[in-house]
Image: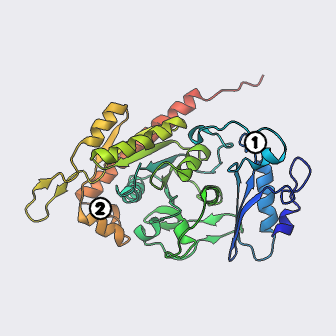
Amino acid sequence: MRDALSGVRHPRGADIVSLGLLSGLSIDGDMVRFAIEVEPDSAARMEPLRKAAEDAVRRIPGVRSVTAVLTSHRAAARERAGAPAAPARPAAVQRPGAKLEIPGVRSLVAVASGKGGVGKSTVAVNLALGLAANGRKTGLLDADIYGPSVPRMLALAGRPTTRDGKLIVPLERHGVRAMSMGLLVPEETPMIWRGPMVMGAIEQLLRDVAWGELDVLVIDLPPGTGDAQLTISQRAPLTGAVIVSTPQDIALQDARKGLNMFRRVDVPVIGIIENMSYFICPHCGERSEIFGHGGARREAERLGVEFLGEVALDSRIRETSDSGRPIVVSEPQGPHAATFRDIARRVWDKIEAVLEERARTAPRFVIE
């Protein structure tokens, strides 16, 4: 492996191995992952180097999958070159390179939450199915590397295939094309990866999947505002983000952090969804607001973003997701499916508004 990488030359002339720029090399069967240390402000210029290293390892017999990422985690390149250390910059405002190109995909929407336990993945899956039910060509990317749940919620089984040895073909269920790290590793296998490896895996899921022609790709982010969220916010050409929260103050406090992160990296916030908004007793029909009610709507008004809707706390939503037939497809005539389709309609309206605004403000070139 190192012999192959020794043939990859850095712009300074020497190879990346002798310069000590290689880190995090791991081999898992036919899957190889590693990182290349670069200066914090040179990531865009070093993209050809990353690609060359990835190609060099891919040519090794028996290697099926390669993930190479650029990282400035130790600022090693600058130190070894004898240059003074670059001043630290806040991670939330770094621009580590050009946006990835995802051919055929008109729009990308990230579904995020500031904390775990708010039902974000359940909302993301049903939102994707709602968009598909409304006639949109939809894809779903499970970007939660540590805890992928989309395969179980969509009853996806088997490993994805590849047509040309480069692009992975996503699986399809209920009219939605889906991809998840959970399809590439056994369900019980823990992902014990550091930040650069997570970032590389997410980039590969975006870059090396044959999504085809899609109106919208829904990206189910892990909770919080860490490496995965920043990677997608900075590298994926996001059309916007949807924030999921429950009504109580502690959840809204974390949701506010997630919303502000997207604003810091210039990603439009499409709106907020209040999940577990209320509970209807299946026996007596009495309504209970277990976690409070209306907090997300008030927060949306305070922050100047759209309130997209409220989803009930109902065992049927949980049961159908656990069984691999989410409520939108298992009970399409029911009230919960109608709620998700209505939220999906609101999300699509906002997507179209963002795309139209970008088209109006895009630079025009006149050739005479």
Badge 2: residue crowd in 10 Å (few <14, some 14–19, many ≥20): some
Give the residue pinned by disc 2.
Answer: 332
> Residue 67: image x %, image y %?
69, 62
Quadrant of residue 321 within the rendered picture: bottom left
Image quadrant occupied by the N terminus: bottom right
Residue drawn 65% across and 38% down?
88
> Residue 39: image x %, image y %?
75, 44
Type of amino acid under label 2 = Pro
Give the residue pinned by disc 1.
Answer: 42
Image quadrant occupied by the C terminus: top right
Q: Which residue is the extreme one toward the right?
A: 13
Pair 1/2: label in front: 1
Q: Please tell me whether mark 2 sits on a helix, a strand or a loop.
A: loop
Which badge, 1 or 2, is on the more N-terminal residue? Answer: 1
192 versus 112 height, above or below: below
Left-right relation of 292 to 296? left
Measured Cα–Cα span from mark 1 to mark 2: 50 Å
86 versus 206 height, above or below: above
Residue drawn 56% across and 65% down?
170
Q: Which residue is the extreme one toward the top?
A: 368
> Residue 281: image x %, image y %?
13, 61
> Residue 37: image x %, image y %?
75, 52
